[in-house]
Image (tube, helix red, strand yellow):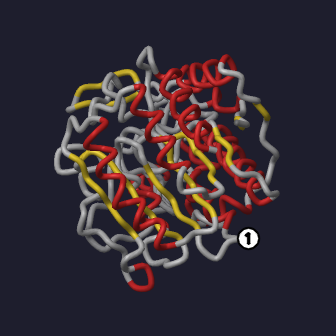
Amino acid sequence: MKIVQTDKHKLHDPQFFMVRGLPRPSAEQPERAERLLAAASAAGHEVIGPDSFGPAPRAAVHTPEYLRFLEAAHREWQAQGDASEEILANIHPGRYPPTYPDSIVGRAGWHMADTACPIGAGTFEAACGAADVAVTAAEVLLDGGDHIYGLCRPPGHHAYADMAGGFCFLNNAAIAAQHLRQAHDRVAVLDVDVHHGNGTQGIFWRRDDVLTISLHADPRNFYPFFWGHAAERGEGDGEGYNLNVPLPLGTGDAGWLAALQPALATLRAFAPGALVVALGLDAYEGDPLKGLAITTPGFAQIGAAIAELGLPTVLIQEGGYLAPELGDNLVSVLKGFEAVR
């Protein structure tokens, strides 16, 4: 399988993370991508670099004011003179009718859902590089390719059209799906990360041309908490085009694969022309964020089940953190997929 990746991801090296009120080192480290790339290369997969597509694919998914914020935020934050090296929002507008603020402090709160998405000097460039990886992968399908993996970092599925969150800034899976709409009337996004793909859901919430499906740890007791519940089905034209499958914490291979089958039935009924898989490896039993309990062989079964759909498929990297088996889990997914295709 071809692997698309860029070294621009190294420009984003977040330091701050908060767990139950305690500051910790961020789990979303550059070493994640380095381990994934090394494992894929050692397994014999061909590695290619992305093309540059400019701002248009990002603008097809994200709002102009959000993109302006991401591009200029770190510079404006530093210009205050007494600010932290990374942008960390200390105020949020909440759920009452707000006004878009002029202050960079206010705009940080407006566009950042939580403290898990600190913005550093190289964050925007790294995020743009990840978006180019996703679009390059989508282009391979538009050129007649059958399947490809985009090693995107930073990840993207928690990013809304106008808001960062959960390590994510630009929604790579949504950008790839929107790009594939050039050739396909219908595109599906299947999210298998341990966390709900809330940003992807939000982007396509009112649309019937992109089906969004997410299998994830139950958000009643797991991030992102507010989104990812089974009752969320979309609105307007999009009603019925969003499917959430929350799973009990600690669900293993058998339970996860059983839950996948009705989700795949929904996907087949939608009959998309192409599929984007938001590939989180953090459902692993030994992942530091510990939500589900998929084994390394289980990831091969997941890859095979997805491949059996027979759809042109882009695999977009989402979560998966620094467990020793991180690279093995990626290789297992790709091996399972290619055993069928």
| Residue found 31% across the figure and 36% down from its top | 253
Task: From the viewer's side, name the closer residue of 297 and 231.
Answer: 297
Quadrant containing the C terminus in the rendered view: top right
- Count up the numbered dots: 1
Residue that extends furthest to the front in the rendered view of this protein: 340
Q: Where is residue 224 in the image (x, y as percent from the top left)?
A: 30, 49
| Residue found 24% across the figure and 26% down from its top | 22
Establish if 237 lies above or below 216.
below
313 vs 283, left or right, is right
Residue to which mark 1 is pinned? 183
Q: Position of residue 134 (x, y in %)?
A: 66, 48
Task: From the viewer's side, name the closer residue of 262 and 151.
Answer: 262
Residue that extends furthest to the bottom in the rendered view of this protein: 236
Quarter of image, res 275: bottom right
Establish if 132 lies above or below 321.
below
Task: From the viewer's side, name the closer residue of 34 and 256.
Answer: 256
| Residue found 41% across the figure and 18% down from its top | 323
Q: Can residue 87 be seen in this view?
A: no
Establish if 237 lies above or below 282.
below
Establish if 248 lies above or below 42.
below
Q: Where is residue 9 in the image (x, y as percent from the top left)?
A: 64, 32
Quadrant containing the N terminus in the rendered view: top right
Secondary structure at badge 1 equals loop
